[in-house]
Image (spheres, rainbow, N blue to C red):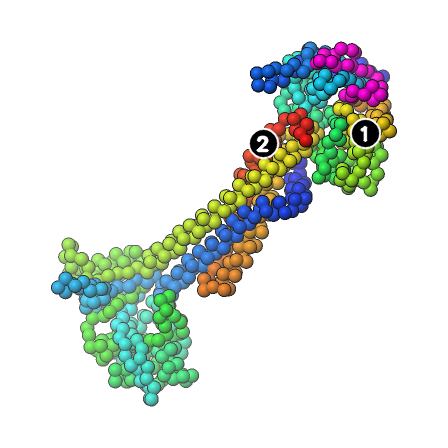
Amino acid sequence: MKFPILLDIQSAFKTFARNKARSFLTTLGIIIGVASVIATVSIGQGASASVQSAINALGSNLLIILPGSSNLGGVQTGFGELSTLTLQDAKAIRKLPAVKTDAANIRMNEQVIWRGNNWGTSVMGTSSTFPVIKNWPVTKGEFFDKQQDNTAANVAVIGTTVATQLFGLMNPVGHIVLIHNVPFKIIGELKAIGFNAFGQDQDDIVAIPITTMMEKIAGISWVNIIMVSAKSKKDTGLAQNQITALLRQRHHIPPHKPNDFYVRNLTQIAQTAGSSAQIFTILLAAVAAVSLLVGGIGIMNIMLVSVTERTKEIGIRMAVGAKKNDILKQFLIESSVLSLFGGVLGIGLGVGISDLISLISPLHTILTIEPIIISIIFSVAVGVFFGFYPAYKASNLNPVEALRYE
Amino acid sequence: MDGNINKTVIRLEHIGMIYKTGTINYEALKDINLTIYKGEFFSIMGASGSGKSTLMNILGCLDQPTSGKYFLEDEDVSTLSKDRLADIRNKKIGFVFQGFNLIQRLSIIENVELPLFYAGVPHKEANIEAKKALRLVDIAENKENNFPNQISGGEQQRVAIARAIVHNASIIMADEPTGNLDSVRSNELMSFFKKINDERNVTIILVTHEPDVAAFAKKHIIVKDGHIVDN
């Protein structure tokens, strides 16, 4: 290297140190730009992660099958109004190649009674596979098994809210409760998972075998919902197609008729929500990038002033042997160092803002290394891009005229 | 020195320089022919506007003539690229200007190191050479890290001489070097030029309009209206 770059950088710092206030004000645009990018990307990534985790909490590779809507005298009801889904449908779905397991559900609001205490809750008839599909284990006792499911056993697994309301600090396992005047033995307590994204207390629940629900509580032969877990995330689309084809065949639906059921692919919903959050992040970052652009113009302006102020110096350097490239390099390094310096300060400010937002607002921010690295690269690029014209102008000065400049 | 006495360092053949300002052409130099030998102390005299500074710029490779040929140590430099001219200035020529032309935001030692940096000399080595050059022009060690505005005009000009000789240039171009100095400092400075000329056999080309200063040189030309009128 002809003129060691470190000396150029050192010289750049000396130049800025002589004009501290001006250098700081010049980099302010970059500082604000980078800080905005860091803060907005961290908000966007936080929002994206929150949506993702809320959807993941619903279950792994989950597909939800609901009965279709009905049309009574021109009045179209919502999904889930028909009684087209049966336990046999669920058993047939379980055999599909892309399906790992399933759980049929019926939900009813019932009063649960234990001695002098009672609590109104959502009683859910479900299959023994429920904990696997919902990623929802028991912490005390156990979940009912296939045998208990098949024999319509009077067993129940309760959520922590129900346990607290009825039993306080006592272990509920082994006690008998009454649901719809039918005695049920509590065999387990589900792990507490708190509220869902819609503010619903998920622990306020009692799970009983689906067969027990159908025969002893609801007295119905259909189910409200079938939850299906696909073999893998990429199999969810295939599973959706297989389920649709199977149910259309089982329900004898002619080709021109619409489905009497509805299949929701939660992975697809998660992906859509994820990409929406990503677009939101990109949009925010693009807006923030505009201030980086403005910062770059500020740097170009000051570098042009600097070239004019230092015309004589450029002439002296040329007289002692500096070539065009030496002058070009010197001014490019100065603008890049100035911009990088602004970028580093901007990162510090951005991280601070991101932490502050997390601390004082309900927004959850996530800061990864990528936006920080991109900000550093971008701020140097801004310095090089906007510093090029002033540097080029400096390198093309005529040495005689530059030496004469006062 | 005797061995070099007839070695040509500079040869100008029919050099002309025309400046164009819009549609007006101004002929600053007309048919200049000149030969300067190695180790000569040479003065170019003339009134203001006579063309002596233009001649100096061409001799110093800061500018190129519009006609004629300029041979510097037998190389025709009249048509070289700007980068090649920069290279020649860096390796063969040292400048001393009337206004000292030191970079104010660099320390004295950094100013002297500058030609060596552009020559690619490692910093440590450049620092040693710069210190030697400063000692030669009697700049005290404790002033090396001062900035130019912290020393006197005479000292600044001596620093400029140190910068001109630090890279062992074979030619020093001094353009009105005493213009900003009083008579005592002028004599002192000219003594340094004489010493360098005598001890290092460096060719010195001095541009001045002061006969007292020109008297230090051994050969003289007078430029008037772009011509050499007396040699």
Subunit of mark 2?
A
Q: Kindly tell me whether residue A74 is visible in this rendering.
A: yes
Residue count near mark 2 (Cα–Cα under 10 Å), binned few <14, some 14–19, many ≥20: some
**Observer-nearest residue: A338 or A164?**
A338
Tell me which amino acid carries mark 2: Lys
Residue at image coords 61%, 47%: A24
> Given the current orientation, which residue lies at the most extreme bottom position?
A116
Tell me which amino acid carries mark 1: Leu
B229 relative to A15, above or below = above
* Residue hosting label 1: B181
Q: Which label was assigned to residue A234?
A: none
B11 relative to B148, above or below = above
The image quarter in which residue A192 lies: bottom left
The image quarter in which residue B9 lies: top right
Q: Dot 1 lies on which element?
A: loop
Quarter containing the N terminus of chain A: top right
The answer to whether A357 appears left or right of A303 in the picture is: left
The answer to whether A312 appears left or right of A250 in the picture is: right
Residue at image coords 51%, 46%: A292
Residue at image coords 47%, 49%: A288
Q: For the residues tagged 2 and 1, is the chain the same?
A: no
* Residue hosting label 2: A393
Tell whether position A100 is magenta. no
Task: Report x, y in % for residue A157.
Answer: 34, 78
